[in-house]
Image (cartoon, rainbow, N blue to C red):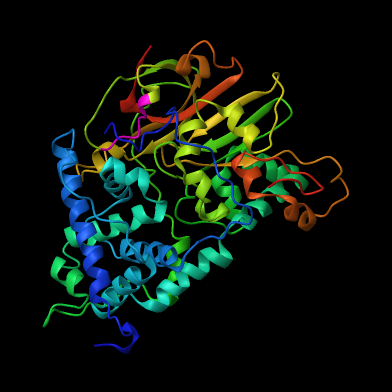
Amino acid sequence: MTSQDGPVGRRGFLQGAAATAAAMAAEAQVAHTQAPHDHDHDHQAVPSDLNLRVKALESLLVEKGLVDRAALDAVVDTYETKIGPRNGARVVARAWVDPAYRKRLLTDASAAIAELGYVGGQGEDMVVLENGPKVHNFVVCTLCSCYPWPILGLPPVWYKSAPYRSRAVIDPRGVLREFGVELGDDVEVRVWDSTAEVRYLVLPERPAGSESMTEDQLAALVTRDSMVGVGKVSVAGGPS
Amino acid sequence: MNGVHDMGGMHGLGPIHHEKNEPVFHEPWEARVYAITRVLRAGGGRQNLDNSRHLIELLPPAEYLRMSYYERWLARLLNQIVANGVITRAELESGHPAPGSPKATPAVTAAMVPAMVTRRNSARRDAAVSPRFKVGQRVRARNINPAGHTRLPRYARGKHGVVSRDHGVFLFPDTNAEFLGEKPQHVYSVRFTARELWGEHASARDFIHLDMWDDYLERA
């Protein structure tokens, strides 16, 4: 029907996807109503080519008039090039050079972050946690993958992974050590499990040796991991 | 629900893989699934964020653990568009619109994307609801085991903590996820010692803070 289908056409790919969806919907229903779930049937195999399947899904949605391809391109471009951890780095650098801004950030983070123009979904209600020599904060979402999109962008795979989500709350110092953060016994560790709609940003410690740096230079030092709290900022640009 | 998504404190799920210079999306399909979900969500209909989270929790547990994050999003998307009647199963199977089916107009155009991504959609509610607890007060997380959606993790149930902040009034996910109303109430940051949650071998200098709705708490 349309030339972009290519020689194979989209039929075969979507059949698999539909079967997967149907099987999942049915199983979800079963799981919801009668646990435990009996595994006396075959599960759908892993889709062999998700790129082709999702292309076929997108073509169907476009033909139905439900999505606009250019809008999808714009969403992807936004999160690949515009909304990411550089936004958060600007917030941190401003807080390091401007004590009044730092104070506003710690008392009303949503408003202080909005001053720099960073607003939107998953960042409406922000709280900033300040790391220092005696207190180290870091953030997890054990139940899903809540993350402050407008200032850090979309979360990395490790943040969304079962190992991080399961261990951050029961073995916080071990997790931090794996990220290269060694803390003395005198340092208090605070883990923030994002169970509600409040989103957390860690304000890392300003590194020694950065005293003469400009705000732009400071922003370039700030890593995504340091703003989740699983990294520290260093002038040499150590492990992210 | 007591599902595998509630994984705080579980053992044996493997090492943390930290990828250097990780791309935002690893494959084109991940980007497209994310974008399709965002624009369809912006189009409204019978859906909300809590219900969307619950649909992920309802994936069969073995599938949930096997799937990558965006595979879960794809599974939810397919389930959602079929369940909401946006696409029929026959259309998914044929890959083409049903003959004679009406053609919609996309809710989001490229020009609308900047406004869509910066739009605030806060769960905060301007409702005159009194807090049941005060900052500094010792509280206990209730031992409840709802079969539906909840944001009270198993590892905190029945445990004692101290209210450290009052975040204000927010809609309640347990009812909102089932389209049973917003039930606005206070949300607090509650501070638990690691020893209260995990026992005497935990560090006395470790603390876990969870955000908890009024309905999750009782007087200690």
Corner quadrant of residue A45: bottom left
Quadrant for the C terminus of chain B in the image: top left
The residue shown at (44%, 21%) is: B134
Q: Horizontal and vertical percent for residue B38?
A: 37, 62
Q: Is residue B26 above or below residue A139?
A: below
Residue B150 painted magenta: yes
Q: Is residue A174 above or below residue B109?
A: above
| Percent x, y of residue B141 | 36, 20
Q: Where is residue B185 drawn, in percent x and y? A: 33, 33
Q: Which residues are magenta?
A: B149-154
**Closer to the camera, B1 or A130?**
B1
- The residue positioned 72% from the left and 23% from the top of the image is A184
Quarter-of-image position of residue A153? bottom right
Question: Depth check: A79 or A27 in front?
Answer: A27
On the rendered image, what quadrant is the N terminus of chain B found in? top left
**Residue B159, picture quadrant:** top left
Question: In the displayed structure, would residue B81 be above or below residue B106?
Answer: above
Name the magenta segment's main secondary structure. loop
Give the mark count.
0
Is B172 contained in the magenta span? no
A87 up-or-down from A211: above or below? below
| Residue occupying image coordinates x 13% and y 77% | B98
The spot of residue A140 in percent (x, y) is 50, 38
Of A48 and B34, which appears nearest the observer?
Answer: A48
Direction from residue B20 to residue B119 in the image, left or right: left
Q: Residue furthest left?
A: B100
